[in-house]
Amino acid sequence: MADEVLTQGDQDLLLRQFEEREAKEIGTGVYEKYLKIAEELENDNR
């Protein structure tokens, strides 16, 4: 749905802003770290 409303430039800007906020608020790479843990837990339960 966002692809229909936002231009590619707007999407790129939004992504950069999210990345900047992540770096300021929780630190770079923290999200990815916990995502990997969640994926490993999911795979262990299969």
Image: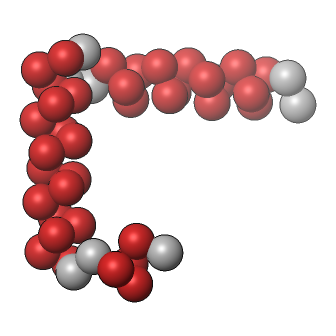
Question: At x 13% / y 45%, what residue is drawn?
Answer: 17
Q: Residue 3 appears at what percent x and percent y?
A: 38, 78
Question: At x 47% / y 19%, what residue is drawn?
Answer: 34
- Residue reaching furthest to the right: 46
Name the quadrant of the C terminus: top right
Task: Answer above or below: position of 45 versus 6.
Answer: above
- Residue reaching furthest to the front: 5
Q: Residue 35 appears at what percent x and percent y?
A: 50, 28
| Residue 4 falls left or right of residue 20 | right
| Residue 2 falls left or right of residue 15 | right
The colour scheme is secondary structure
Q: Quadrant of residue 43?
A: top right
Q: Residue 10 appears at what percent x and percent y?
A: 16, 69
Task: Answer above or below: position of 9 versus 12.
Answer: below
Q: Nearer the viewer, residue 8 or 29?
A: 8
Number of labelled discs? 0
Q: Nearer the viewer, residue 33 or 23?
A: 23
Q: Residue 33 appears at what percent x and percent y?
A: 40, 21
| Residue 14 falls left or right of residue 43 | left
Task: Answer above or below: position of 9 versus 34.
Answer: below
Question: At x 22% / y 41%, what residue is drawn?
Answer: 18
Question: At x 12% / y 74%, what residue is drawn?
Answer: 9
